[in-house]
C-alpha cells in the first residue's frame, strides 16, 4: 500500500497528465516567454522539473504509440511489446493490484486489451489516436477533398479553414449539454477528470487513486477558442532561431502526413501561422489544466496527490524546415516532465539526462508501491531529492524506424541516417537550437574524432540494451 506523505496519514494519490505533441521548449517559466502557460508555471513552482527529458523513439510514424507503450510498461523501445504493450505489468495494473482505484480519460492510442488491463474506469477514453477536421487519404498519403477547407498544405491562397470554426470537427466535439453545442477536447478531458476527482473527494474512503488524463492537445488540427488565438497575432509570433524553408535532406518519412500540414517551401508567414495556432491550443489546454488544479486545491486533494505533467514527444512546427516529430532534433525528442506534490522539492529544476518513460518507476517509489522487476527505466525520485545525486544516464539514445539513430550526452549529439549513409554532429551546449551541423565543417571527421567515436560507441551499446537489431558501423559513414 502507499506511503503516508499527505496530511493526517492519508495515502498518496497519483494524477498523471500527458499532452500530445508538446515540445520541451513550451513553458513560459522554464524556457519560452513567447507562450502563456500560467498553470504549468504553477506546477513548476510547486515541484521539480526535468529540463532534459526525452522519449526513446518509435517503430512507425505514430511516435506517440511507442512513447506511450514505454510509459505504461516502463520498458525500452524494442522491449515494450509494441502497440499492444505485450504481457508486461502495466502502470495502472500494478497500482490497481496494490489497492489503488484507477481511472483514465482522453487519448489512449494503444491496443484495447492493454487499456482494459490498466484501468478500472476508462469509460471516457478515446481509443483512437488523432482528430482530423478535414480529409486525408492515408492509403495514398496525401490530402483529399476540397482544398479550400483542408487543414493540410495551409495556409494557401483560397484556403479558408479556421482554427476557431467550431463546425469544422477535429477538437470541436458535438455536445448537446454545452452552451453552443460543442466542446473542445481539452475541456472534455478536464471535465471528466474533475468529475472523477469530485467523486473521489465526496465518496470518502481510504482507497488512493491513480488517475491518467491524456489531452489530445496540442496535436493538429491545432484548434482553440478565438480569445486564445487573439493572444497570438500572426505577425507578432516570432520565428524560431532554426527556421528553414526546407530541411536540407530527406531525413526519412520526408513527406508523411505530419509534413503535409504546410506547403513547401515553409515561408515565414506559414511558420508564423502554424506556431500561432500551436501556442493558442497550448494556452487553452493550460487553462483547462488549471481548472483541474483548482479543484485539487479546493477539495484538499492537492495535499496528498503526486501530480505529473509530461508529453509523449515534441514537435517541429517549422523548426529545421519540418512540421512533425519524426526527426532527431531536440524540438521533437525532448519533452516537458514535471513532478509536484508531497515529498517533492518545490521550485527546482534538474538538468540530468532522463527519459519520460521513467514516470512508472518514479511514481511507484514516491507512493511506496512495489514496482515490478520488469521495468527498464529507473526511478527519478533520488535525483529529485538530491540535485547532486548520480544521474540515471550518462547519455541518451533515440531511434526512428530504419531512418535515424541518435546518441547525445550533455554537450554533443551524434545522429546517423542509415538510409543515406550520412551523419550529423551538434555541440548542443553551445548550439541549443542545432543550427550548426559540425559534420559540414572542413575535416570534421578528424577534428571531432574523439567525440564521434565516444558517442558512436555509446550508440552501439544502447542498441544492444534496447534490442535494436539494426547493425551500424563507423565505416558506413566514412568515420572509421
Image (cartoon, rainbow, N blue to C red):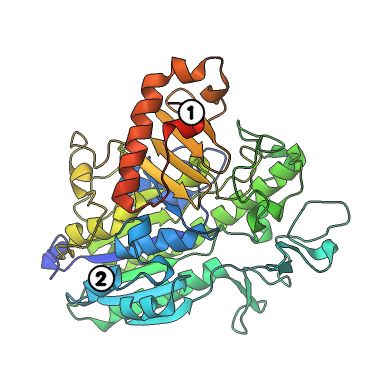
- Examine the rendered structure and indicate whether residue 231 appears above or below residue 105: above
Number of disc labels: 2
457 vs 400, left or right, is: left
* Residue at the image point whose x is 15% and y is 63% from the top: 7
249 vs 161, left or right, is: left
Element type at mark 2:
loop
Q: Could you give the CA–CA distance between mark 2 and mark 1, rounded to whole angstroms?
A: 38 Å
Task: Please give the residue where the numbered disc 1 appears in the rendered image.
Answer: 425
Q: 460 and 98: which one is in front?
A: 460
**Numbered circle sitting on residue 31:** none
- In the rendered structure, which disc, 2 or 1, sits on the residue that comes first in sequence? 2
* Residue at the image point whose x is 15% and y is 68% from the top: 10
Residue at the right extreme of this rendering: 158
Q: Quadrant of the C terminus?
A: top left
Residue 231 in view, yes or no: no
* Residue at the image point whose x is 36% and y is 52% from the top: 356
For marks 2 and 1, give the one nearer the viewer.
Answer: 1
Residue 227 in view, yes or no: yes
Residue 119, horizontal then vertical, whole percent:
33, 78
Element type at mark 1:
strand
Residue 173, horizontal then vertical, whole percent:
62, 75
Callouts 2 and 1 close, C-beta under 8 Å = no
Q: 134 and 426: which one is in front?
A: 426
- Examine the rendered structure and indicate whether residue 213 appears above or below residue 273: below
* Residue at the image point whose x is 38% and y is 24% from the top: 451
Task: Please give the residue where the numbered disc 2 appears in the rendered image.
Answer: 89
Q: Quadrant of the N terminus?
A: bottom left
Crowd rating for badge 1 (residues with CA inside 10 Å; few <14, some 14–19, many 20+): many
Residue 84, horizontal then vertical, whole percent:
40, 72
Amino acid at each position: 500500500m502507499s506511503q503516508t506523505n499527505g496530511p493526517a496519514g492519508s495515502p498518496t494519490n497519483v494524477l498523471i497528465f500527458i499532452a500530445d505533441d508538446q515540445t520541451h521548449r513550451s513553458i513560459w517559466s522554464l524556457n519560452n516567454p513567447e507562450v502563456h502557460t500560467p498553470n504549468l508555471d504553477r506546477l513548476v513552482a510547486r515541484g521539480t522539473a526535468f529540463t532534459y527529458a526525452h522519449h526513446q523513439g518509435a517503430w512507425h510514424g505514430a511516435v506517440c504509440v511507442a512513447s506511450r507503450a514505454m510509459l505504461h510498461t516502463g520498458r525500452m523501445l524494442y522491449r515494450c511489446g509494441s502497440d499492444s504493450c505485450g504481457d508486461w505489468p502495466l502502470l495502472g495494473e500494478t497500482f490497481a493490484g496494490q489497492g489503488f482505484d484507477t481511472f483514465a480519460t482522453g487519448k489512449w492510442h494503444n491496443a484495447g486489451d492493454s487499456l482494459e488491463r490498466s484501468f478500472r474506469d476508462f469509460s471516457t477514453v478515446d481509443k483512437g489516436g488523432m482528430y482530423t477536421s478535414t480529409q486525408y487519404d492515408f492509403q495514398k498519403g496525401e490530402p483529399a477533398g476540397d482544398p479550400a477547407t483542408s487543414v493540410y498544405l495551409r495556409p494557401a491562397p483560397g484556403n479558408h479553414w479556421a482554427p476557431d470554426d467550431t463546425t469544422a470537427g477535429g477538437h470541436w466535439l458535438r455536445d448537446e449539454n454545452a452552451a453552443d453545442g460543442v466542446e473542445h477536447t481539452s475541456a472534455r478531458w478536464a471535465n471528466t477528470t474533475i468529475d472523477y476527482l469530485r467523486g473521489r473527494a465526496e465518496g470518502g474512503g481510504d482507497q488512493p487513486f491513480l488517475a491518467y488524463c491524456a489531452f489530445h492537445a496540442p496535436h493538429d488540427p491545432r484548434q482553440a477558442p478565438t480569445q486564445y488565438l487573439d493572444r497570438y497575432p500572426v505577425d507578432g509570433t516570432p520565428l524560431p532561431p532554426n527556421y528553414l524553408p526546407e530541411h536540407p535532406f530527406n531525413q526519412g518519412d520526408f513527406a508523411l502526413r505530419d509534413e503535409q500540414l504546410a506547403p513547401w517551401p515553409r515561408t515565414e508567414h506559414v511558420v508564423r501561422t502554424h506556431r500561432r495556432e500551436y501556442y493558442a491550443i497550448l494556452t487553452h489546454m493550460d487553462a483547462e489544466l488549471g481548472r483541474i488544479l483548482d479543484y485539487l486545491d479546493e477539495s484538499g486533494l492537492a495535499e496528498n496527490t503526486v501530480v505529473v505533467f509530461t508529453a509523449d514527444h515534441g514537435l517541429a512546427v517549422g523548426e529545421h524546415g519540418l512540421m512533425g516529430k519524426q526527426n532527431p532534433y531536440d524540438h521533437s525528442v525532448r519533452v516537458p516532465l514535471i513532478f509536484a506534490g508531497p515529498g517533492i522539492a518545490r521550485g527546482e529544476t534538474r538538468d540530468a539526462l532522463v527519459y519520460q518513460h521513467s514516470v512508472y518507476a518514479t511514481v511507484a517509489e514516491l507512493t511506496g508501491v512495489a514496482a515490478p522487476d520488469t521495468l527498464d527505466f529507473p526511478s527519478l525520485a533520488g535525483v529529485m531529492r538530491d540535485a547532486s545525486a548520480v544521474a540515471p544516464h550518462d547519455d541518451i539514445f533515440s531511434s526512428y524506424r530504419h531512418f535515424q539513430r541518435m546518441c547525445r550526452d550533455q554537450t554533443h549529439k551524434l545522429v546517423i541516417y542509415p538510409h543515406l549513409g550520412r551523419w550529423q554532429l551538434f555541440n548542443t551546449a553551445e548550439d541549443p537550437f542545432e543550427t550548426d551541423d559540425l559534420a559540414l565543417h572542413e575535416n570534421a571527421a578528424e577534428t571531432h574524432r574523439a567525440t564521434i567515436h565516444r558517442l558512436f560507441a555509446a550508440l552501439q551499446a544502447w542498441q544492444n540494451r534496447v534490442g535494436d537489431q539494426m547493425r551500424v558501423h563507423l565505416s558506413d559513414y566514412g568515420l572509421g
